[in-house]
Image (cartoon, helix red, strand yellow):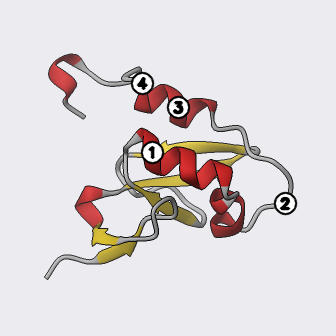
Amino acid sequence: MEPVRTCVGCRTRAPRSALLRVVAVDSAVVPDDRASMPGRGAWVHPERECVDAAIRRRAFVRALRVSGPLDTTALEKRLNGYGHEVNDSK
């Protein structure tokens, strides 16, 4: 049975493979594609709606337990397609 996680954007439960793990690195939200970076992580659907909802509700700040605002530029670039290899493979 595959592990289940909760999306911090839409608050629905989904299999771990359907979500993207993010971590806070130097006050920035960074995608963790391999789900192996150290530190506390948060899970979100890799869709614009869920990420926007998480930013609007300050869910990343709460889930990652950091104080102050977080820079989400790297996550937004990832959603816009930057950082993907050819043919949208990881």
Residue under numbered circle 3: 76
Q: Tell me the quadrant of the picture where the N terminus can be found.
A: bottom left
**Residue in the picture at 71% in, 38% down:** 71
Which mark sits nearer the N-terminus, 1 or 3? 1
- Is label 4 in a helix, a strand or a loop? loop
In this picture, is 28 found above or below 62?
above
Report how far apart the C-alphas of labels 3 and 2 lie in the structure. Answer: 21 Å
- Is label 2 in a helix, a strand or a loop? loop
Kindly identify which numbered label has been placed on residue 49.
1
Which picture quadrant has residue 14? Answer: bottom left
Report how far apart the C-alphas of labels 1 and 3 lie in the structure. Answer: 11 Å
Horizontal arrangement in the rendering, residue 25 relative to residue 19 (left or right)? right
Tell me the mark number nearer the camera, choosing from 3 and 2.
3
* Residue 51, x across and y down, in percent: 51, 47
Which mark sits nearer the N-terminus, 1 or 2? 1
Report how far apart the C-alphas of labels 4 and 3 lie in the structure. Answer: 6 Å
Residue under numbered circle 4: 80
